[in-house]
Image (tube, rainbow, N blue to C red):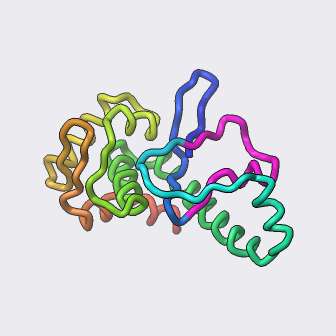
C-alpha cells in the first residue's frame, strides 16, 4: 500500500498479503486518489468485481464482521508503519519491511531490488544499500542482484520489533 506525493515520490504505509484484501474502497465508492497498490511478490489471489462484492455483502451481512476485523487490524498495521517512519532509522525500517515481506510471502528468499525497497521506504537507493550492508555485516541477511535471503529471522524480527514497544506504551 503506497501513498504518492504530488512530486511523485512514494512511501509504503502498509503491506497486504494472502491474509488480506485490497480494493475495498472501490466497493464502498470511497478512498484517497493517492493511495496505490503495487504487487511486490507474485502469488495467487482471488478477484471480484466491486459490484458483485457489494451485492454479496448486502446478501450476507455477516461477512461485514470479518471485513471489519480485517480493517481494524490493517489500521493498526498502518499506525505501526507510521510510527516506524517517525521513530526508527532506515536499518530498523528495512528490517521490519523484510520481516513483513517474508511473513506475507511465506518465504525467506525474497526477490526485491534496492531500488524497489527505496520506493517502499521513501528513501534514496544508496540508503538501502548502506542499511542492507549493515544487516549483512550482522549476519541477518545476504543479498545479491535483486535477491535477499534472510539468514537469521529471529534476530531480524527482534531488530524490527523496537517500534512496536514504543507504540504499545
Magenta run includes residue 157: no
Question: Relative to residue 90, is residue 50 depicted above or below?
Answer: below
Question: Relative to residue 57, is residue 86 depicted above or below?
Answer: above
Residue sitting at x 57%, y 24% = 8
Query: Residue 157 at what x, y percent from top left?
Result: 32, 63
List the single residue furthest toward the bottom.
62
Residue sitting at x 46%, y 35% = 122
Characterize the magenta stretch by its predominant secondary structure: loop
- Using the rendered view, name the quadrant where residue 119 is placed: top left
Between 56 and 23, the residue placed more toward the observer is 56
Residue sitting at x 22%, y 48% = 135
Is residue 110 toward the left or the right of residue 167 in the image? left
Question: Relative to residue 145, is residue 148 depicted above or below?
Answer: below
Between 140 and 52, the residue placed more toward the observer is 52
Q: Which residues are magenta?
A: 20-37
Is residue 115 toward the left or the right of residue 79 in the image? left
Query: Residue 59 at what x, y percent from top left?
Result: 85, 72
- Using the rendered view, name the quadrant where residue 155 is placed: bottom left
How many numbered circles does the render carry? Answer: 0
Query: Residue 6 at what x, y percent from top left?
Result: 64, 24
- Using the rendered view, name the quadrant where residue 66 is placed: bottom right
Question: Relative to residue 37, is residue 79 depicted above or below?
Answer: below
Query: Residue 38 at what x, y percent from top left?
Result: 52, 42
Residue sitting at x 46%, y 63% = 164
Is residue 131 toward the left or the right of residue 165 in the image? left
Amino acid at each position: 500500500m503506497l501513498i504518492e506525493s504530488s512530486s511523485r515520490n512514494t512511501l509504503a504505509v502498509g503491506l497486504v498479503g494472502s491474509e488480506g484484501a485490497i480494493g475495498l474502497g472501490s466497493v464502498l465508492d470511497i478512498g484517497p486518489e493517492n493511495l496505490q497498490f503495487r504487487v511486490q511478490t507474485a502469488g495467487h489471489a482471488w478477484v471480484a468485481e466491486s459490484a458483485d462484492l457489494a451485492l454479496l455483502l448486502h446478501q450476507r451481512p455477516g461477512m461485514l464482521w470479518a471485513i471489519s476485523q480485517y480493517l481494524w487490524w490493517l489500521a493498526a498495521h498502518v499506525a505501526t508503519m507510521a510510527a516506524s517512519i517517525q521513530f526508527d532509522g532506515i536499518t530498523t525500517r528495512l528490517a521490519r519491511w523484510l520481516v513483513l515481506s517474508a511473513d506475507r510471502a511465506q518465504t525467506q528468499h525474497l526477490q526485491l531490488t534496492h531500488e524497489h525497497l527505496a520506493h517502499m521506504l521513501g528513501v534514496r537507493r544508496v540508503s538501502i544499500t548502506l542499511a542492507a550492508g549493515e544487516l549483512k555485516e550482522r549476519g541477518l541477511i545476504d543479498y545479491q542482484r535483486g535477491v535477499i535471503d534472510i539468514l537469521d529471522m529471529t534476530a531480524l524480527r527482534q531488530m524490527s520489533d523496537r517500534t512496536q514497544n514504543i507504540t504499545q506504551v
